[in-house]
Amino acid sequence: MLAFGGIVVALMQTLVVPLISDLPALLHASTADATWVITATLLAGAVATPVVGRLGDMFGKRRMLLGSLGMLVAGSVVSAFSDSLAPMVVGRALQGCAMGVIPLGISIMRDELPPEKLGTAMALMSSSLGVGGALGLPGAALLAQHADWHALFWVSAGLGAAVLILVLVLVPESRVRSGGRFDLVGGIGLTAGLLCLLLAISKGADWGWASGSTGGLFGAGAVILLVWGWWELRSAEPLVDLRTTFGRQVLLTNLASVMVGFSMFGMSLVLPQLLQMPTATGYGLGQTMLVAGLCLAPAGLVMMVVAALSARVTAAFGPKVSLMIGAAVIATGYGLGIVLMGAVWQLILVAAVIGAGIGFAFGSMPALIMAAVPQSETASANGLNALMRAIGTSVASAVLGVVLAHMTTDFGGYALPSEAGFRTAMAIGGGAAIGALVLTAFLPGRRARAATVSDGAVPAGPVPEGQSATQSTTSG
């Protein structure tokens, strides 16, 4: 049920993709302003995820989960009534605030599920981010094609309400809490720094990467985050425990998460465009948005299946091995994509292979994170890991967007991404996966009892202060 909630939240990422070209007319706005419908969700999700995770650790994960789902429903209703830009941006921002559902769900699972069920459940919950994104595109395209566009948001409101009711009825409140006082200064600092950084990444292509606005935001974000880090290291009750975060296992896992997030979004960005490119170009496949979305749907189904396999591999060999397998499979999928671009079935195969790798990788990350942090900090630690994935998707959008915008071919007076541009984008996506593989190789080669659930050794309570879960390990 929690995994279903994660999938519903992840649907918000691709909900408006079928409307992108029509948004300026629908909302009576310029093309540049209409992009805020997507940017607002990204920014809100990036800011809310670590903050909601910390609040969940302190005051109750179920409580924060219900609040996040409430914002999803409220944002969907606001968007459903919108016919102009401002309320739509507000509604989409509220939807983005629900992204904390995934790390909160993982943490509730650790606190409440029996050891024999925990590994598979966590893997499925973690992979729900990719599953929802892959399955949401064809569903959204089908609705947009056959119904009024407002129906997209009414459906998302209904799904959000259904998950909220299920949580109320079926999910108990976790008894594991850290307590303490919320780090308001740290929350404001992290919010400001992330907004500057992600806004520069998201809007840099529109404003110009060398423009004063983009450079100023990058500079401001760097300064704010440095000051924020100084504050967090000196705070008695920090928003993010940077000492744990900069530990070898958490740091390398988060850096690998950025790379895997990059690769995941690369597939969602490159393959639909290639599928919809006119056949007259010589390399396009001339499919509709709906068909392109359906071609990506098998990748989402593969992620769900592979998540369970990832949990078994993690139980047998440790989460490091699962993450390395995932990164290697993603790189293989992109390698296939470079040479297999000539038919629809080939791109379905490429998407399925990449999806299998993402399922493996995402399924292993919660185990790696939770093996290295106290149980009372699992929601905030997983929230930070989810933030790293979001940063990866943002960077992918910027980098691959630049590649496809500059490597073009003339088609009837219009500049379209060239075949070489698509191959280059796939090579970059594969390179990011190889980067994740290299980072993962430097992770400690140990299997944490807190992360390996088949042996029934999940800690029953918070890890004592100053001792991480990785201090009780067996050889992997």
Image (tube, rainbow, N blue to C red):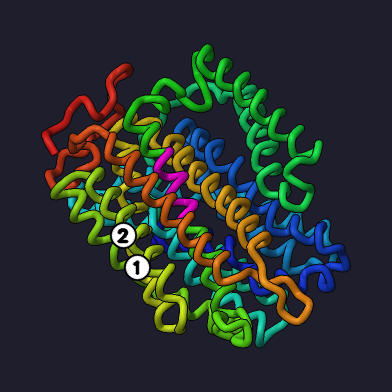
> Of helix, strand and loop, which one carries label 1?
helix
In contact (CB < 8 Å): disc 1 and disc 2: yes
Is the N terminus in the top left, top right, bottom left or bottom right quadrant?
bottom left
Q: Amino acid at mark 1?
A: Val
Which residues, given as a range, are shown in magenta? 255-263
At which x and y percent is residue 131? 43, 65
* 457 is higher (above) or lower (below) than 65: above
Residue at figure coordinates x 53%, y 48% from the top left: 390
Dominant SS of magenta comes to: helix
| Residue 433 on the magenta span | no
Q: Quadrant of residue 382?
A: top left
Residue at figure coordinates x 55%, y 52% from the top left: 396
Residue toward you, 111 or 432: 432
> Of helix, strand and loop, which one carries label 2?
helix
At which x and y percent is residue 145? 66, 85
Lower position in the chain sequence, tag 1 or tag 2: 2
| Residue 260 on the magenta span | yes
Residue at figure coordinates x 34%, y 70% from the top left: 302
Residue toward you, 211 or 154: 211
Residue toward you, 144 or 209: 209
* 129 is higher (above) or lower (below) than 200: below
Q: Amino acid at mark 2?
A: Val
Residue 374 showing in the rendered view: no
At which x and y percent is residue 386? 47, 45
At which x and y percent is residue 23? 77, 69
* 406 is higher (above) or lower (below) than 275: above
Mark 2 surroundings within 10 Å by alpha-carbon count, few (fewer than 14), some (14 through 19), many (20 or more) = many
Q: Say which residue label 2 marks.
A: 329
Is the C terminus in the top left, top right, bottom left or bottom right quadrant?
top left
Q: Quadrant of residue 33?
A: bottom right
Q: Say which residue label 1 marks.
A: 353
